[in-house]
Image: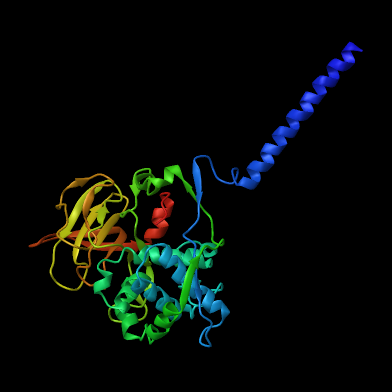
Amino acid sequence: MHWLWKWTIIGGCLLVTFFFISCMAIVGMYAGGSSSPTGCLETQPAQAVAAVADTTQWDEEQREIAGLIIGIGRERGFSDRDIKIALMVAMQEAKLRNPKVATDHDSLGVYQQRPSQGWGTPQQIVDPVYAINKFYDVLATVDNRDAQSLLDVALAVQNPSRKAYLSSNNYFPGWEDEADALLAGSGAVAPVVTGVRQVVCEQALEPEVAQVASDWQLPLRDPYRLTSGFGSRIDPVTGERGAFHDGLDFAAPAGTPIYAIADGVVIEVRVTAVSNGWGNTVVIDHGQVKTRYAHMQHQPAVQAGAHLKAGDTIGEVGMSGKSTGNHLHLALYEGGTIEQRSSGPVYVPGEAIDPVSFLQEKGLKP
């Protein structure tokens, strides 16, 4: 009988151990501990909703969107003027609704944000909490916004490169009274439990890691926003349809440092006070391609003939030349020639290539 008691005790211990491990696994699964990669943290965007008075002007869906815009804005500490701008843009772009099917290119959601321009994935953009937070993220980068008109601030957030075109096409009709009425009739702010969870990895918290791949890197660090891509577009200054845009525009605050995307030699530095063309510009020969960095705020920080390493600072974001707002125009070319002129060497472009496709091949996502 001694052996029977011995194996009974051992079997009981094994059963208890199995039960304990199973319970821990279930707890971990429901706690979300197994859903994030090692070294990652799960976060959620700011979430709050303000009570909005019932009106005949706006239906239930529209009042809910307005409540989120007001609530999130107040939770994040934005002024009533900022929140009014956020309301007016949402009224203009999607009539305080959340379209989940694109009807204009790939524009989606409350603010008609576009995945192709860096606003997020389609799944994220059609989550109103995410979209509203993203709008406020960019709004926070607009310099001296309290001194600018409501329209100018709105366009600086939505699409700086199209400011002149949108202004001339009645982008911002009379939404101010409606926004004021919603703000005046709003009540207390309460938390909400919706929103897309974002997984933030420790290694992604450092920009140098998140935005550098091997010997190549992006020309700007956050915060920035892609506003105009490569190819045919409506010219933001002239309104011409079908105008060819040979690069990628990064909207960012004035003075944001610009970095060389790879090792190379500076083959052109241009400083000009003329309000057309590329403005203050640097062109770098990387061997495989040549890159142009245009519309710098001041005289570039490098000279022709300088040998650079990836990540060297070459200037600051501005709006010199033909520009409607602070941004970096990054263009990539294959081939081309250099002409010697009295003002110094000038690069005559070869074939322009899509910066997004090229950078993605290098493991980078603009």
Q: How is the image coloured?
A: rainbow
Q: Is 39 situated left or right of 353 in this image?
A: right
Q: Farthest residue toward the left?
A: 342
Give x and y (percent) for residue 308: 22, 46
> Relative to the observer, which residue lies in front, 94 or 32?
32
Q: Name the residue at 60% across, 43% down.
A: 34
Q: Is 121 situated left or right of 312 in this image?
A: right
With respect to residue 111, does 270 lie above or below? above
Q: Is 212 situated left or right of 55 in this image?
A: left
Q: Is 83 situated left or right of 104 in this image?
A: left
Give x and y (percent) for residue 30: 65, 47
User: Residue 215: which quarter of the image?
Assistant: top left
The quadrant in which the N terminus is found is top right
Q: Name the residue at 30% across, 48% down.
A: 262
Q: Farthest residue toward the top?
A: 2
Q: Can residue 110 be seen?
A: no
Q: Can residue 127 be seen?
A: yes
Give x and y (percent) for residue 107: 48, 72
Q: Name the residue at 26% across, 55% down.
A: 258
Q: Farthest residue toward the front?
A: 188
The quadrant in which the C terminus is found is bottom left
Give x and y (percent) for residue 248: 34, 64
Number of marks in picture: 0
Q: Name the residue at 21% across, 58% down.
A: 282
